[in-house]
Image: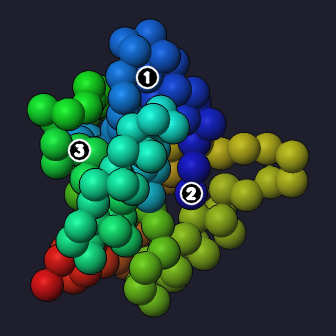
Amino acid sequence: MIDPEIIDLVIETHLWEGNDYTSNTLEPTYPSGLDVEVMTFASLEKAWDEAKTPSEREQVTSYIYQHPDLFKLGNVAWNLNLSHFRWKIDVPADLEFVKVVYERLYQPGRIFKMQDIFDLINANPKLKEINSGINRNGGYYWSRV
């Protein structure tokens, strides 16, 4: 799931601050699945050239944010910490959650946003139990083993 307003905010922050890399995940406050990363081509090229470990080669942006001495980093945070929510599909429980959200919020020609999903969960608290307790970045951590 994506929210175009969050994407625009991260891009605007990146350009305004003149960062090499800007994200809303360096200090996560948004639900997992609304992750946005913006980087310069030069920083991506440098990471590609210098990354050595399998996890850095698979997730090349990890090289960038793990080297703040080489890159100017920026983070966009939300005013509430919603990072415990999973709004992406990695495991079957995630798919079940996303199906329910789409069944209730999708309308042709209308984009639903983070606040719409948050409002839906607040009105139906059991929804957040569908895929709770799953590691936010399990795939990345697994690739580092």
The image quadrant where one finds the C terminus is bottom left
Residue 65: which numbered mark, if any? 3
Cβ atoms under marks 2 and 1 closer than 8 Å: no
In the image: residue 82, left or right of residue 119? left
Circle 1 sits on which residue? 14
Of the two numbered discs 3 and 1 on the same chain, state the one appearing first in sequence: 1
Q: Amino acid at mark 2?
A: Met
Residue shown at the point (65%, 45%) measured from the top left: 112
Of the two numbered discs 2 and 1 on the same chain, state the one appearing first in sequence: 2
SS at mark 1 in the image: helix
User: Label 3, label 2: how many angstroms apart (C-alpha)?
Assistant: 23 Å
Question: Which residue is most to the top?
Answer: 16
Residue shown at the point (23%, 67%) measured from the top left: 52
**Residue 23 appears in which quarter of the rendering?**
top left
Foreground of the two, 49 or 90: 49
**Residue 136 appears in which quarter of the rendering?**
bottom left
- Residue 115, position in %: x, y? 49, 39
**Residue 70 appears in which quarter of the rendering?**
top left
As drawn, 69 above or below 133: above
User: Label 3, label 1: how many angstroms apart (C-alpha)?
Assistant: 14 Å
Cβ atoms under marks 3 and 1 closer than 8 Å: no
- Residue 19, position in %: x, y? 36, 22
Foreground of the two, 12 or 114: 12
SS at mark 2 in the image: loop
Question: Which residue is most to the bottom?
Answer: 92
Foreground of the two, 136 or 61: 61
In the image: residue 69, left or right of residue 46? left
